[in-house]
């Protein structure tokens, strides 16, 4: 059974993620200390809230997460967890992120209601990405659930697997080797989200 660490640093919807991963056929474990990562097959970085508080609360986990990625373990960042993987964020000032993905997190435009809360669709730009192409095939135009005020301005276009439009077109699924990130919440996205979690678990098994 695949063992997946869900990092509890005070900024995540942990129970929903844990339930989704269990349904997807894995053995999730909510962890509170960095040393627990070593015995796991993969890491989930959830996130709800503000970038500054989250990156400060996450400090003791940053190097262990990077070490896990360097060892070949799979990482999935969800919502704010995606944003924390970036070089820096403009939310509440300018703050340094984990720098696992290149670019800056910036605010959604004032032309739309902020935050974006609710369902929006995916424009899948790379059909061979593991989250959308596995045991389950995710169709282009599928709807998933978003809650966010900021988005990632990714500097490497080839890492974008899917895009979404909300006042601006932003990356909604990112993949770089064994690093995955979704701006939406797969654990809140119904059948589509569960299929993605199943594909994620299958990728870890491989």
Image (spheres, grey):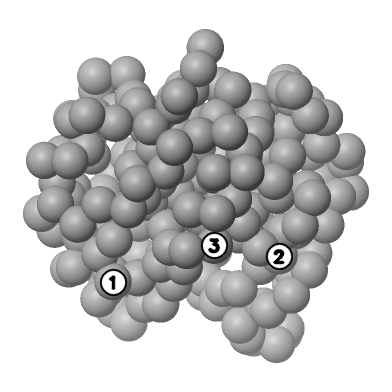
In depth, the one of 191 and 1 nearer the eye is 1
Quadrant in the picture for the N terminus: top left
Q: Which of marks 2 and 3 is nearer the N terminus?
A: 3
CA separation in Å, label 1 and label 3: 15 Å
Residue hosting label 3: 16
In depth, the one of 131 and 29 nearer the eye is 29
Q: Residue 145 carries which label?
A: 2
Residue at the image position 35 percent from the left and 70 percent from the top: 11
For label 1, the crowd category at 10 Å Cα-Cα, with few meaning under 14, some 14 to 19 and many 20 or more, is some
Residue at the image position 29 percent from the left and 61 percent from the top: 8
Q: In this view, does 116 lie above or below 184?
A: below
Q: What element carries label 3?
A: helix
CA separation in Å, label 2 and label 3: 13 Å
Residue hosting label 1: 10
Residue 146 percent coordinates (x, y):
66, 67
Q: Earlier in the sequence, mark 2 or mark 1?
A: 1
């Amino acid at each position: 059974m695949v063992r997946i660490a869900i990092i509890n640093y005070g900024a995540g919807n942990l129970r929903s993620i844990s339930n989704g991963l269990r349904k997807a056929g894995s053995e999730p474990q909510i962890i509170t200390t960095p040393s627990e990562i070593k015995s796991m097959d993969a890491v989930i970085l959830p996130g709800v809230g503000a970038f500054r508080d989250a990156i400060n609360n996450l400090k003791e986990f940053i190097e262990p997460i990077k070490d896990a990625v360097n060892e070949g373990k799979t990482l999935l960042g969800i919502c704010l967890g995606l944003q924390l993987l970036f070089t820096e964020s403009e939310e509440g000032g300018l703050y340094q992120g984990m720098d696992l993905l290149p670019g800056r997190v910036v605010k959604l435009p004032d032309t739309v209601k902020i935050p974006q809360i609710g369902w929006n669709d995916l424009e899948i730009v790379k059909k061979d990405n593991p989250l959308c192409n596995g045991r389950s095939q995710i169709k282009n135009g599928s709807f998933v659930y978003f809650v966010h005020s900021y988005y990632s301005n990714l500097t490497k276009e080839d890492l974008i697997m899917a895009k979404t439009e909300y006042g601006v077109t932003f990356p909604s699924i990112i993949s770089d080797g064994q690093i995955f990130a979704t701006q939406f919440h797969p654990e809140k996205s119904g059948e589509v989200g569960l299929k993605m979690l199943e594909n994620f678990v299958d990728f870890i098994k491989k």
